[in-house]
Image: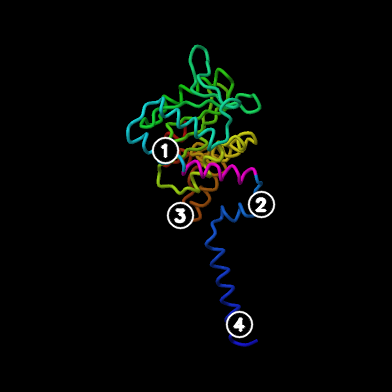
Amino acid sequence: MSEQTVQAIVGNEQAETAKGAAVSPAKRAAGARAVPKWETDARDRVRAAIRRYAKPLNDLVARDANEGDTRLLITDFLCVGLGYDKYDDLTTEYQVKGEFADYGIRIDKQLVAFIEVKRCSQKLNAKHLRQVQMYAVNEGVEWMILSNGQVWQAYHMTAGLPVVIDLALEVDLLSDAGLGAKTDALFYLTKEAFKRRLIDDLWRARAATSPKSLAQVLLSDVVADAIRKELRRQTNHNADASEIHRILRDEVLRPETLL
């Protein structure tokens, strides 16, 4: 084999290696499965809508538009971007015990989520979440969405005493995040993804790795025993497992993760 041939092979291998390294793990994972046409179409639609409504959204924020004007944009985005039919899938001013939710989302005639809208310049907060949570509790709905047009948040509610509320996703359409990241997040709110309950998988993954879940793992007997053994290996000090628990709980972990 000539020297030129060897150099050419080595060069091709290096180029392929560099090419592979440039592809993110997420993209390699996505490439490992065949993406169905419905998903490709939904993502393309969301991406186009984010571009299309960027300027109108910026204009609303610049003039501090009221909640009614914000709702007009959100209605368009729900239909054009997320694929909901204005008449079959959305219901406005949904009455719940004398109060009115801004939107209810129906899929196959089943109520699956409530949406609470705030004016574009108003930051979403816990008070707004409690408001839409009341609707969800009374109607037995698992999903709650807050939006001011710019920021979209989706929360899952697990019934019980007390109910458990988990943030499944949050996306800011006017942030510096890339178009791909915004599309990936909002894809889970599309009619197609909601119908297939893909957002449930997203919620379970986030709940499993939440600070509270990780804190519970760190405070487990198995982890405390592993820490005790590693401390003894490194320092020759045979710490008591209960003392390790106390230090982790009182001095290492943040208090809010233990609630």
Question: Magenta includes 57?
Answer: no
Q: Which residues are magenta?
A: 38-51
> How far apart, in angstroms, are the residues tagged by discs 2 and 4?
34 Å
Residue carrying label 1:
254
> Sequence-wise, which precedes: disc 1 or disc 2?
2
Identified by mark 3, the residue type is Thr
Residue carrying label 3:
235
Residue 158 image position (x, y, % from top left): 57, 27
Residue 216 image position (x, y, % from top left): 52, 37
Q: Are marks 2 and 4 in contact (CB under 8 Å)?
A: no
* Quadrant position of residue 9: bottom right
Q: Mark 4: which secondary structure?
A: helix
Asked whether 145 or 183 is in front, the reply is 183
> How far apart, in angstroms, are the residues tagged by discs 3 and 2?
48 Å
Whether 194 is drawn above or below 34: the answer is above
Closest to the camera, between mark 3 and mark 1, is 1
Disc number placed over residue 6 in the picture, else none: 4
Q: Quadrant of the N terminus?
A: bottom right
Crowd rating for badge 2 (residues with CA inside 10 Å; few <14, some 14–19, many 20+): few
> Sequence-wise, which precedes: disc 3 or disc 4?
4
Q: Residue furthest left?
A: 63
Whether 200 is drawn above or below 43: the answer is above
x 53%, y 15%: residue: 96
> How far apart, in angstroms, are the residues tagged by discs 3 and 1?
26 Å
Question: Magenta includes 44?
Answer: yes
Residue carrying label 2:
33
Q: Are marks 4 and 1 in contact (CB under 8 Å)?
A: no
> Sequence-wise, which precedes: disc 3 or disc 2?
2
